[in-house]
Every structure is written in C-alpha cells, then in structure tokens.
Amino acid sequence: MGKKIGRNPTDRGKSGTKRSLLTEGNGIPLAVAIDGANRHDKTLVASTLGDMMIERPEVTESEPQNMCMDKGYDYPDIRDLVAEYGYTAHIKARGEEITAKQQIPGYRARRWVVERTHSWMNRFRRLLIRWEKKADNYSVLPLVGGTTLAMVHFACAFISFRFAEVFG
C-alpha cells in the first residue's frame, strides 16, 4: 500500500483515508492532515498542528489557548506535544461526558464544533466518496497530479468563506 492510504478496519478492509482537523472555537478549519484509515488518531496530531494555515496569536496567561480532544488522544506524548505548541489540553473520557450531561442541563461537549466541521466537509461528495485507488493521486500536491488533498484544502477555504459570509 502507498502513503496516506490504509486498510479501513470498519469497512471490510477496503482502502480508506482519515482526516485530522483542527478548528477554532466556531468550527472554522485552521489545519488539516490526512493519513490511512488504519492509523491511530494520535499519529496525526503533530502533522495537523504543523500544518496550521494562519499565524496564531501569542499565548499569554490572560489569553490561554485551549485544545479540546477526545479520549483517543489521552497519551502523555500527545499532552507534551500539545503543551509544546502552547495549548492547554482538555481531554475528557467518555464516562466524564455522560456524567456532565446528566448533571448540567444543556451540556454539549466542547469538541462538537470539530464534528460539525467534519460534517460540513462530508457535504462535498468529492471528499465523502473516495474515488482514487492510488495514494499518489490522493495526497500529492495538485501541481504534480493529485487532486483530493487540494479538494480538502478547497473545502476548508469554502467553509471558512461561507462562515465569514453568514456570520461575519
């Protein structure tokens, strides 16, 4: 198998791709990384943080920057990496969220904005259905012949534009 492609364990071993997405508080995409569907989520954290599309504001004590992640990222090396980038990690276990939902009326998990942005990206049929069979056609930059990574970036730009148009 090639790079950025892997057997999807939930889809009878067909080739698939995993997207890792970093958004700001409203769900506007800031960084995206892709890899094979058979890779663990934690392997994409470094490349996602490294692919930030805009310059971040400086982290101060009065203005900390938070990162909300699910239990799949609860590893010491990931916590250290997130801290190196200047974020305060907020990683809740599933049981903690269930307890919070029962105790706090109207409680929503902080990371729901990322899930919503993934849903917005899935509305681009080109991204929802994986047409490419070769990894080179999926992940190589558009000037070399790949199209889907360019489409992922296009989808992020389009989502950002529409968000700014509606709420800006």
Image: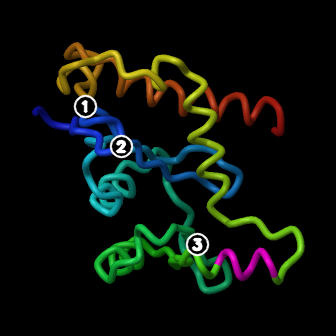
Q: Are marks 2 and 3 in contact (CB under 8 Å)?
A: no
Between disc 2 and disc 3, whose residue precedes?
2
Q: Residue at x 73, y 35 (%)?
A: 163
Q: Is residue 49 above or below residue 72?
A: above
Which residue in the structure is indicated by mark 1?
A: 15
Where is residue 129, by image quadrant? top left
Which residue in the structure is indicated by mark 3?
A: 65
Between disc 3 and disc 1, whose residue precedes?
1
The residues bearing labels 3 and 1 have C-alpha atoms spaced at a distance of 36 Å
Magenta residue check for 101: yes
| Residue type for callout 3 | Gln
| Residue type for callout 2 | Thr
Classify mark 2: helix, strand or loop. loop
| Residue type for callout 1 | Ser
Q: Is residue 45 above or below residue 78?
A: above
The residues bearing labels 2 and 3 have C-alpha atoms spaced at a distance of 34 Å
Q: Are marks 3 and 1 in contact (CB under 8 Å)?
A: no
Q: Residue at x 23, y 13 (%)?
A: 145
Between disc 2 and disc 1, whose residue precedes?
2
Quadrant of image for the N terminus: top left
Marks 2, 1: nearer the viewer: 2
Q: Position of residue 94 (x, y in %)?
A: 57, 74
Where is residue 130, by image quadrant? top left
Classify mark 1: helix, strand or loop. strand
Q: Is residue 81 left or right of residue 60?
A: left
Which residue in the structure is indicated by mark 2?
A: 10
Q: Which residues are magenta?
A: 97-102
Where is residue 99, by image quadrant? bottom right
